[in-house]
Amino acid sequence: MAERIAPITMPKFGLAMTEGTVVGWLAKTGDNITAGQELVEIETTKITNVYESPVSGMLRRQIAQEGEIQPVGALIGVVADATVPEAEIDAFIAGFEAETTRKSDDGDTTATPANTIIEVGTLRLRVQDSGNAHSGKIPVVLIHGFAGSLENWMLTQPVLAEQTRVIAFDLPGHGESSKSVGDGTTRTMARTVQDLMNTLSIDRAHIVGHSLGGAIALELAALGPDLVASLTLIAPAGLGPAVNGVFIEGILTADRRKTLEPVLSLLVHDKTLISRQMIEDMIRFKRLDGVLPGLRTLAAASFEGNRQSISLLAALENYVGPVSILWGENDEILPVANADIIPDQGMVTRYAGTGHMPQLERAGEVAERLATIVTGQDNP
Amino acid sequence: MSRKSFRQAINEALRQEMRRDERVILMGEDIAGGKGGTSGVEEAWGGVLGVTKGLYTEFGPDRVLDTPITEASYIGAAAGAAATGLRPVAELMFVDFVGCCLDQIMNQAAKFRYMFGGKARTPLVIRAMYGAGFSAAAQHSQALYPIFTHIPGLKVVIPSSAYEAKGLLIEAIRDDDPVIFLENKLMYDEEEEVPDEPYTIPFGEANLTREGDDVTIVAFGRMVALANQAADLLQKQGISCTVIDPRTTSPLDTGTILDCVAETGRLVIVDESSPRCNMATDIAALVAEEGFDTLKAPIRRVTPPHTPVPFSTALEKHYMPDADKIAAAVRSVMAYAAKQEA
Amino acid sequence: MQISHDILLRSYRAMRTIRDFEERLHVEFATGEIPGFVHLYCGEEASAVGICAHLSETDTIASTHRGHGHCIAKGVAVEGMMAEIYGKKSGVCEGKGGSMHIADLSLGMLGANGIVGGGPPLICGAALSHKLLKDGGVAVAFYGDGASNEGTTLESLNLASVWSLPAVFVLEDNGYGEATASSYACAGSQRARAEGFGMPYVECDGTDFFAVHQAAAEAIGHARSGKGPVMMHVHLARWYGHFEGEAASYRRPEDVVRLRAEKDCLKNFREQVASTSMIEAAELDAIDKAVRAEIDQAVSKAKADPMPEAADLLENVYVSY
């Protein structure tokens, strides 16, 4: 041995390896080893390989522990003669590590609620199940709209989750849920919500629906009134005649940033809210297998040009629980004038300077409003 | 959605397409690895850099075929199989090996459809690694996409990230024409968010990874990330850049390039391939011909010198374009414009 | 092996069609009306026909630059072939391919090929398709003595053996690769090459239809039964040069005279069927007459048919682009 202390470093196997995981040491600290003896098992993205000691001596330290990832060249162990004092080895390690950057695999520790995939019948639904399930309060189920996803509730969900259990999910054909939408009717979608609640053992919930999700919420109220503790409809479809066919058609046909940006801009009154990332996310969503046929089926089931082919006014009138309807006065997709046909105008709150997504443009007010419903302090 | 490496994204694209369509088969040198070895382990490697790992185990020897080291015969076999009902994905390992089988690509697969009066379909994908950067030297480091781009009948794809790789590879496998799919070997461990579901990214549609007012940068493959780095650096110095990733060199999204140059008036092209007759010269010619009136400064090309790829890490560093070289080129076209205005 | 009356008549007709097609091209080429290169198959007819008699549309063949005979034997339409050779829009490849690229994939004809040794790798792929799609088909690569030395061919023999493919490698050995004799260019023996790759080897006189038919039955039967590839060495001689218009000074004129007199597969066929009373001469005479008319018609039509339009230039580079 030329040096008194020899470093054992993460070896490089093959051309592309940049880091490796220590699977296990094949020699214990204090073992005498000879050059060429199998010393440590290393795993890369390609292979698991045994690293043979380049030197002879005593294995004095195992620096990298099992499961640790280290870059190529990092110090993973020390071999030295048995006579070398511990202090000298410590100094050697300190000196070596001053020149290398250690990298540990801490994992992701961010606190966003985890999304899970839940099997509901033949469908797989992405569900964000958050909040306090033991609050004693009735849970909330959030239903997004056409071409939306559970991310539409990102400003709503955290506020509600402080109060009770909150379920946001991707409808079939949306987000990361199955892309099969069946006949695409709001009735079929409502049955899926019913099945989801059943799967999650939720027998009653405050139902919040946005846009097409509002129509689905109304269908659900008709299907199973007992499931619905209250209805909150945000710019809902199914009430009133008009829909902006340019938006629906644009969602179906525009597939580049330039053509999609004006379409998504119809969603909001403050056009600066449509970020590059939102457009990119929509483009990426539309590229997924099965998305376009699903969206086409959904659109065809509920819309025809600038008219809605569904009407759920009767469902609204028959529902006996509390109802709140929130609408942006500058909605360019389902115009606020649609709300005029609602018999009890006391249900309706109109937001000035707001487009089709009050839960985004009036995030604070909408979330507060929903929170009062959950806590039973709502007095419309 | 989860974080996946470039390698995992490619593996997942292959796996999902093989599950979807049993006509999709893989062939190549050591894509399983280990056939006939004394250990009896039949999937010892899963590709020389582990890209096809696990596919042999899932799909078996009929659909994941290890070949002898005979590029001409198996690339030709892939072409013949494509013309007769299968959808092969052949791996050429290092693109530098194309010298051994160019006839089967250039004179056979690429020509069938035209030469046979539209009566042939050749749904063939040839995957290969390209690029310099880990001292693999002159015969294992080239960026030969201009050779393929030059040949009518081929489509040429250069993914710039894991997300791009999965969507473009699935598109390539579903395409009915022969597609050359080139993977930069330095990128295999680079990770980003990639959907778990299958998706496709259409060919011939450039992606703008940055949008700015002053200079348009066109970059390919791994150079896109370097161009982004340069753009982000320059942004802090008051120069805003558009970065275009054309994704495919054939078809080439000439419209987006001309539109962006019309907006910025300045163009820098970053191309890892040798400078004579490469993508940079091609795009420079395009803009000189069709966008001349919109230019405020001469076009600059950032490429390696016209030398083979050197071995020594010191030399290879000089050889390769990097973010500093790109930023310097951008500053020089800005300086030219300032000089003209002064 | 008993060959049915019907197959005999069809085989004779195919050989006669090839002969008349090629002889007529020889004449027409000299007028200057046919563009490009033409490589004639005269004298080799029994090889293509004796082998393709065992194939159906499910089976695949790949041909060579000397491909007219293989096309006709595999069933490609004569009118469309002639129009193709004249560069007309009505040609089987719409005037995009010409003599060296005639193909019809719907008939399992994977193309003549302008590259010596271009076909064998493709045939490995076609054989793989037959094997994996389980359609019972075999794939046949025709290649010449010149191509027998190409790396692509030798690699393909190896690959077909390694993968145990239903492939037949038909070496049409006509004695010359372009202007160079195979006695000069081919080292060792073809039989030893087949043995070297671990595949059976059969050989036959390619000017004797019955000999080819018999050997092909054995070779194709072997491949079709799943036992792996096989090499079939067919000894031939071409009557014309490598291509039309060449200087044929590399061989003695009397060689060709002797070939025509002694090694004519059509004459040979007539003599054999006459001696065994299998077919009446009158039946064959009727075929001769019908074929002459068919070729006349194909040439007249090819000459009269319109050229492709400028817009056709850009069509069919890709399926979609």
Image (cartoon, rainbow, N blue to C red):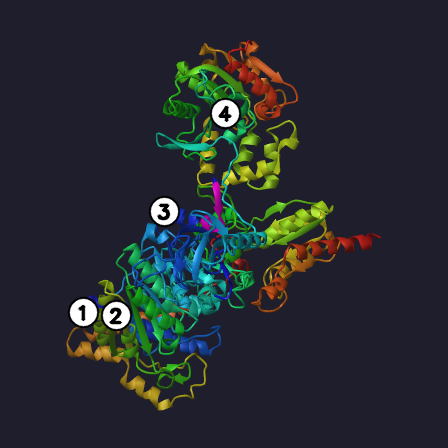
What label does residue B19 carry, if any? 3
Residue B88 coordinates in the image, percent (x, y)? 39, 56
Give me the residue at 39% from left, 16% from top: A224
Q: Secondary structure at mark 1?
A: loop
Tell me which amino acid carries mark 2. Answer: Ser
Picture layout, residue B31 above or below residue A110: below
> Is A83 one of the magenta-colored residues?
no
Q: Which residue is mark 2?
A: C11
- Mark 1 Cα-neighbour bin, 10 Å: few <14, some 14–19, many ≥20: few
Q: Secondary structure at mark 2?
A: helix
Side of B62 relative to A156 (left or right):
left
Indicate the chain on which mark 4 is placed. A
Give the alpha-carbon distance from disc 4 to disc 3, as whole Å.
34 Å
> Is B6 one of the magenta-colored residues?
yes
Give the alpha-carbon distance from disc 2 to disc 3, as whole Å.
45 Å
Residue C138 coordinates in the image, percent (x, y)? 28, 63
Tell me which amino acid carries mark 3. Answer: Arg
Side of C224 relative to A279 (left or right):
left
Q: Which residue is mark 4?
A: A212
Residue B248 coordinates in the image, percent (x, y)? 54, 53
Circles 4, 3 touching at the beta carbon (< 8 Å): no
C321, B218: nearer the viewer:
B218
Tell me which amino acid carries mark 4. Answer: Leu
Which circle, 4 or 3, is nearer the viewer?
Answer: 3
Circles 1, 2 touching at the beta carbon (< 8 Å): yes
Q: Which residue is mark 1?
A: C3
| Marks 4 and 3 share the same chain | no
Which circle, 1 or 4, is nearer the viewer?
Answer: 4
Give the alpha-carbon distance from disc 1 to disc 2, as whole Å.
10 Å
Picture layout, residue C307 above or below residue C255: above
Which circle, 2 or 4, is nearer the viewer?
Answer: 4
Between discs 1 and 2, the one toward the N terminus: 1
